[in-house]
Amino acid sequence: MITEKRGLVILPRFLQRRRRSGQNRRRVETNFQKQAFFRDFIRPSLICVQCSMKSLVCRRERIDADRVSQFHATPGDNDRNDEKGCRMTPRPVRTRIFVVSMANAGERRRTFASGAGAAGVKWDFFDAWDRLHPELSYDEDAAIVAKGRPLRQGELGCYSSHFALWMQLIADPDADQYVVLEDDVIVDWDYLARFAAVDHGLSGHDYIRLYYKKPAPSRVIAKDFVCRATWLTEVSGYCFGTQGYLITRAGAQRLAGHCREVRRPIDDELDRSWIHGVRNLSVFPFPLMERKVESGIGLQRFERFPVPRRLKLQRFVARTRERAGYQLFGRRRFRFQR
């Protein structure tokens, strides 16, 4: 018999059990349908995509191994190279080393020169820029949209300094690659001498960092790189810092063409390898370290900046596109590692 309780209609118990059993039956049927759909359509598609990505990664690793193998010593040279701890046969290459430093930074220059007294390789100071390079263009609103704040004068000078070095390398008939250092680093000159003696452009390594500041995902490209117990890695995402790196003429041409519009700091732009196409490679362990001294750029760039209301929507869209682009393209080589 149907009864009422506080204005609600309550079915008899046997009808309630039958109703619940019907609901459970429909729920089980729906689950079976979902499982069958996943088994027949979704899972095979995911397996195909995963296999394709694995094959791409394996092919890329084979290409990297083939490129690096041409630098390894031949069996007859192992004894001579083992005495030095070196596993690569240096090829004749014209490398120039520049230390970026402000012309009026006398104390920093003296400190760096005192540590480089026994360098064993030739290096020169490069007068850093304190203004925007004439071949660069800067728009403050574009920087706010891309970075979330305008760039400081020191950041524009730093950007211009590295850009000027790239342009100098492109036009330099006496060099194939540059090693660029900042004046606040401590360098392992023994390793750097061997590193600079290798023609990295032959292996397609157009940009190799010697130091970065923020931990980031990476994968190993080659082991015993230049010397034993040293790895060449590829870094994914933002790791920041321009304390030291090697760049070839091909890398300079590509980066100089991409970086003419200044929208973010130079190290941010260099980290965006999925945009400009120059792989973000690095040596590990680092052959140089940054001294903890006050930056010439200043610390005002770390202060909070209120984005103008007229640019908030553009900033949100740009940040969302940046994150999506990194996930889709920046980490594609890192998703299916063994």
Image: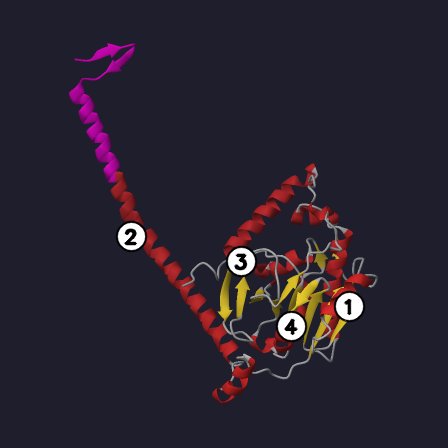
- The 10 Å Cα crowd at callout 3, few under 14, some 14 to 19, many 20 or more, is some
Looking at the image, tell me whether mark 4 or mark 3 is earlier in sequence order. Answer: 4
- The 10 Å Cα crowd at callout 1, few under 14, some 14 to 19, many 20 or more, is many
Q: Which residue is mark 1?
A: 126
Looking at the image, tell me whether mark 2 or mark 4 is earlier in sequence order. Answer: 2
Task: Name the amino acid, label 4.
Answer: Ala
**Residue 34, position as x, y percentages in the image:** 29, 44
Task: Name the amino acid, label 3.
Answer: Gly
Image quarter hosting the C terminus: bottom left
Is residue 167 or residue 74 the one in the foreground? 74
Residue extent of the magenta highlight: 1-29
Please, what secondary structure does the residue beneath circle 4 have?
A: helix
Whether residue 134 is visible here, answered yes or no, is: no
Please, what secondary structure does the residue beneath circle 3 have?
A: helix
Q: Which residue is mark 2?
A: 40
Give the spatial CA distance, label 2 vs label 4: 48 Å
Residue 330 numbered mark, or none: 3
Q: Is 95 located above or below residue 50 in the figure?
A: below
Image quarter hosting the N terminus: top left
Task: Name the amino acid, label 2.
Answer: Asp
Give the spatial CA distance, label 1 vs label 4: 21 Å
Camera-nearest label, 2 or 1: 1
Q: Is 208 located above or below residue 70 in the figure?
A: above
Q: Is 85 located above or below residue 209 in the figure?
A: below
Residue 76 numbered mark, or none: none
Q: Is residue 17 magenta?
A: yes
